[in-house]
Image (spheres, coloured by chain):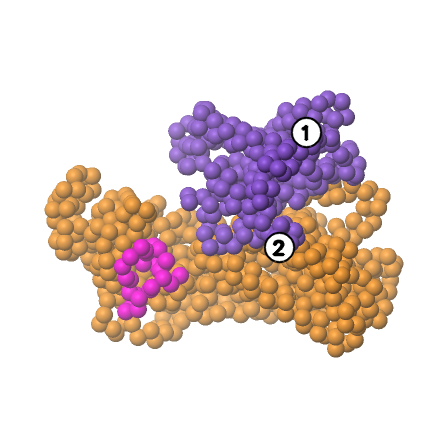
Amino acid sequence: MLNLGLDVVTTAAILFIVSAGLLMVFGVMKIINFSHGAFLTTGGYASVIVAHAGLSWWWSVPCALAIGFLLGMAVERFIVRPLYARPLDAILATWGLGIIVGQIITLMFGRGVQMVASPVDGAIQLAGGQYSAYRLILVAVALLVALALGWLLNGTRLGLQTRAVIMNEALARGLGISSSRVRFMTFCIGAALASAAGCLITPLASVDPNMGVPWIVGAFMLVLVSGSSLVSLAVASLVLGGAQVLVSTFVNPVLGGLTIAVLAALLLRIRPEGFARG
Amino acid sequence: MADSASTLRLRAAAASSWKGPVLVGIVALAVLAVCSVALPTFLVNNLIRAFLYAAVALTVDLLWGYTGILTFGQSAFFGIGAYAAGLIFTHAGFSLPLAAAALAAGIGVAWVVSRAVGWLAFYHGASPLYASVVTLVLPIVLVQGIYSGGEFTGSSSGLSGFDSFDIPLEAWFFIAGALLVLLAVTAWMFVRSDAGRLLVAIRENEARCEYLGIDVSRYKARLMDTCAVIAAFAGFLFACVQMVVAPEYAGFVFGTELVIWVALGGRGSLIGPIVGAISIDVGSAYLSGNLPYIWTLLVGVAFVTVIVAMPRGLAPLVAAAARQALPRRRRAAPVPVSFAVAQPRDGGGAGNAGPALSVRDVRKHFGSLKVLDGISFDAHAGELLSIIGPNGAGKSTLMRCIADGAERSGGTVEIGGKGIRTLAPYDCVALGIGRKFQTATVFESLSVAEALRIARYRIAPPSRWKRETTLELPQPALDVLRLTGLDRIPERECRYLSHGQKQALELAMVLALEPRTVLLDEPTAGLTKQERTQIGDIFVTLTSRYRMCLLLVEHDLEFVQQISSRIVVLHQGRIVMDGGVDEVVNSELVRAVYAGETHAAANHTEGDA
C-alpha cells in the first residue's frame, strides 16, 4: 500500500519534471514543441559525455542544462520563430527536428544502448518496506523545479513580462514588452529544462537515440490538459500519473501505458480547458 | 424581367472537366502495364509497396493539405486493413471467400473506428489541435492493443507466413498501381469540382462555412470515414502482397512519415504527395543500405526546411519551373458561365404576420460579468433596425447570441416563429438567418464565383464531379454583385479584392442563403464615403423591395439616421431606448451615452420605448 502510494507520487514527480519544459513553451508561445523528445535525448547523452569524461554523475545536470539552452537558442531562431503564425506547422517542424537530432546522435554515439551508472545506489528502508532512493530524490527535484519556475515567473522581471505575454500578447507588446525576447528566453529555458529532465531520468531508463520519443506523447497530453499553469500540471501529473500506476498495477501494464493519452483525450472532449481554471 | 439582365460570361474550367483526368488516368494505366514487365524485379517489388503508401498519403493530403485537418492517424486505418487480412489468413486460412470477408472486416472496422474518432475530434467549437491529438492517440492505442494481443496478433513481431493470392509480382504491380491511379483520378475530379472547393473553404475559414449553413464537423467526419476506408483497403492489399504484417505499419511513426511525404511533395496538390511518397520510399529502399543514418537525416533536414521555408512543398516549385521551361501553351478556351436568378423558394415567411425575429429576455454573462442583461425586442419583415451604443455595450455579443444557439446564457430567441434553442450556427441559418461578420471574412484562395457557390451549398448542393456552367443566385445577391461591379470579375481570387469588395462579396454570400433576417455587424467599417452610400442604398432596397428584416450594428450615427426605420440603443448590456429614428437621434439620452456620461441618465429613462 505504501509502495503504491510512493509509486504514484514518484511517477507524478517524474512526469512533472519531464513535462515542465514543454508547458513553459506551450503556455507562452501556444506552440507544441515536438522536439521536446529530442531535448530529452540530448540531456540523456549529456550524462553519457560526463561519464566518458570521468566526472561525477552530478556534473551531468548543469552540463545538460547548458547544452539544452544553447541548442534551444539555435532552434528558436531558425525553426520556431518563422512558424509562430502556423502552430500546426510548428508541431511538424519540431518533430522533424527530433528526427534530425536522433540521427545525429546515432551517427556520433552509435545506435546501441548506453548505460549510465546511477548516482544513488540502493533502496531506502521505509516503514518496514524498501523503496528506490533515486525515485524519492526525484520528488524533491520536482519540488525544486516547481519552486524555481514559480520564482522565475513571479519573482523576476522576465517572469512578469512572460505572464503579461501569456495573458494578452497584443497588450503586452503595446506596453513596450518585447514579446519576441520573452519567447526566445522561454524557449531556451524550456529546452534547458527538457534536457535536464532527460539527464535526470537516465538512472531509471537506458540511454539510446530514441529514448525521448516514448515520453513525448505523455508529456504532450499532460500539457494540453494543463493549459499554461504549473499548478494544473502538478494536479494533472498526480491524477493521470496516479491513474497510470493504478491501471498498470491492477489491470495490465500495457493498458497502463495508454492511460494518460486516453484519459487526457477524453477529458479534453468533455472539458476543453482540462485541469486549468479548475 | 431580371432573367435576361443577369446572364454574364465568365471563365470556368470546361464543363467536360472529367475528360482531362480520365485521359491522364488511361495513359497512366498504359505506362503501368509497360513498366510491370520492363522494370527490374527489385524495383517492381518496391514500387508495389510505394504505390500503396502513396494511396494512403493521398488520403492524408485530402484531410490535411486540402481541408486542414492535420492527421497522424491514417497509419492506424492502414494497419487495421492489413491486420484484418493477416489475422484471418493466419487463423482461418486463405480462400477467396475468406479474403472477401477479411476485406469487408478491415473496411468495416476502419469505418467504425473512424466514426468514433470523428465523434471525438469534430464537434462545433473543437480546436484543430484537438483533432490532431485524437488522431495521434489512435495509432498509439492500436499498437498497444496489437502488442498485448500475444500470439493472436503476433505481438511486436507481427504475423507472417500466411498464404495469400497466388498471382505474380507483375500483376500485383498493376493492381496496386491501378488502385493509385483510380484514386488519384477520382480525387482529382472531386477536388476540382464545385463541391470539392468546400474542402479549401473549410481550411481557409471554418467559421464562415458554419455561418453559411454548412455543418462543417459532419462534413469533416464523413471525409475522414472515406479516407479511413481507402487506407484500410490499401492496408489489405499490402498484407496480401507482402504476406507480413507488423505493428509498425499501424504506428504513430508511420503516421508522421505519411505527413512528411505529403509535406515534401506538396500539400494541397495531388501529384506532389504521390511523387513524394513514391520517391522517398523507393529512395529509402536503395539508399538506406548504403547510407544508413544519413538518408533519414537528409529526409529530416529536407522536411524541416520545406515546412519552414516552402510550406506548399516542392510541387509548386516544380510546376513553376516546368511552366518556365516548356513553350507557353494556350489555356483551354473559357466556357461561358452565367449567373442566373434562382427561383424564390416558398418559405411562407413573407406573408406571416408574426415578427421575423423575436428576442425575449436574452442574457449573457461571463462568470459574474453581465454582458447582456434581459434584452427583449421584436423585429419585423421590411424593417431596418439599427442597434447603436458605445464600445462594450454588448452589440456584437447580441448578434452572436441571435445567430448561435449555444451562445446565450438565458432567454429565448425566435427566428420566423421558431425557437433557436441551442442550435449551432448552421442550423440557425436553416431557420432563415444570415450573419455578416464585423471584419469581412471571405475565402482567400477561392474565386468570387466559387465563394458564392459555397454560399449556395446548403440550398443547391453542387456537383461532386464537374464544374457547372451556371450559378443561380437570388436576385438580392445579384443586385449587390452588379452594384459593386463584382459580377464582372467572378474569376478573381478573393485575396486580390479591395476591402470594400470583400465586404460586398460577404454580403452577397449571406444574401445567397436567402435569409429573411440578416445580421450586419458594422458593415461599413473601413469603407469609403462613396461605398458607404452605395451599401446604404442596398440595405434600403433589401428591406423595402425584398421585405427582409435587417439588423444593423453601427457606430456612425449619421449613416444610421439616413437608412434606419427604427433604432435600439444598447448601453452596458441593457436596452435603454427603442424607438423611431428622430426620437432616438435627438434624445438627450443618446448624447449622454455617447459622450460617456453618467449612466444615471440612462437608468432614468429605462423602459422608455
Q: Which chain is orange?
A: B
Q: Position of residue B287 (x, y in %)?
A: 82, 46
Which residue lies under the disc numbered 2?
A: A251
Disc 2 secondary structure class: loop
What amino acid is labelled 1 in the image? Val
Residue B457 versus residue B128 in the image, above or below? below
Note whether residue B383 is visible: no
Q: Which chain is purple?
A: A
Task: Decide: few, some or many residues near mark 1? Use Cα within 10 Å; few <14, some 14-19, many ≥20.
Answer: few
In this picture, which residue range is highlighted in magenta?
Answer: B399-424
Note whether residue B93 is visible: yes
Residue B398 versus residue B589 in the image, above or below? below
Q: Residue at x 39, y 29 (%)?
A: A175
Task: Decide: few, some or many residues near mark 2? Use Cα within 10 Å; few <14, some 14-19, many ≥20.
Answer: few
**Label at residue A120:** 1
Q: Position of residue A45 (x, y in %)?
A: 71, 32
Disc 1 secondary structure class: loop
Which part of the image, by quadrant, shows the N terminus of chain B?
Answer: bottom left
Foreground residue, B22 or B522?
Answer: B522
